[in-house]
Structures are given as structure tokens and as C-alpha cells.
Amino acid sequence: MNSSNQQQAENHHSPITTTLSGVITKSPSRIKGNTGRPMVKATILAESDKRSSYPLTVVGFDIMALELMAHLRGERLTVTGRMEWNGGYSIVADQIVSV
């Protein structure tokens, strides 16, 4: 394997985490997944200093699902996790903090 392929393989296995803040616009709700693990999603209006606010789906699994369910529409959250594309941008939560 040459160095460029090795670097791409290393980047593929270590996802980039990011931190975003926003207000919950769609209340957290449980959704059925294929694995049977607890899964919850909510929508926040993510804020950025580089662009206007945009809707972003926050997904939580297992303990993060329970953490996300504890929040209500209108609350401000800061979420740390990895970004994914699944029919739209979403962030899979590793940490959720209510501001």
C-alpha cells in the first residue's frame, strides 16, 4: 500500500468530531433502527459564524439516546459528535450539554 492510500485508510477509520450549538426545533423522538439499539433523533437550528442558521438532525444511540430524550423543544444544546450524511446532514452525538 502506498503512502496516499495508507493516509486515506487512516482518515477513514478516525472520524472527525465537531461541536455545534443550536436550539431544538423538533422535539426528540424515538425511532426504530435495524439493530434494536435505542435510537433518538431531534432537529436543532445549528448556528455558525460563517453562514446563516440551518436545520441539523441530532442522533443519539444507547445512553446518548436517553440523554437527548431529556431535552425539550426550545432548549439550547451544544452537541459534540461526528457528522454524517444520511439523506441530509446529521450529527451522531458523543456528548450533549444543555446551555
Image (cartoon, rainbow, N blue to C red):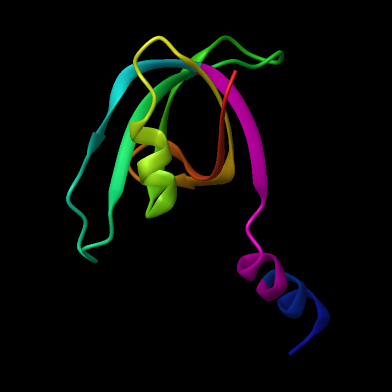
| Among the 4 quarters of the image, the one containing residue 31 | top left
Residue 80: x, y in percent?
61, 39
Q: Is residue 22 above or below residue 56?
A: above
Residue 3: x, y in percent?
82, 80
| Among the 4 quarters of the image, the one containing residue 35 | bottom left
Going by the picture, which residue comes out furthest to the right?
3
| Among the 4 quarters of the image, the one containing residue 98 | top right
Q: Residue at x 29, y 49 (%)?
A: 39
Q: Residue at x 73, y 90 (%)?
A: 1
Count numbered badges in the picture.
0
Q: Nearer the viewer, residue 70 or 9?
A: 70
Q: Residue at x 74, y 79 (%)?
A: 6
Is residue 93 in the magenta section? no
On the picture, is 91 further left or further right than 40? right
Q: Is residue 46 above or below residue 95?
A: above
**Highlighted magenta segment, given as a residue range:** 9-22
Residue 61: x, y in percent?
38, 52
Quarter of the image containing the C terminus?
Answer: top right
Q: Nearer the viewer, residue 38 or 18?
A: 38
Residue 9: x, y in percent?
66, 75
Q: Residue at x 34, y 29 (%)?
A: 42
On the picture, is 30 further left or further right than 6? left
Is residue 14 in the magenta section? yes
Q: Is residue 47 above or below residue 78?
A: above
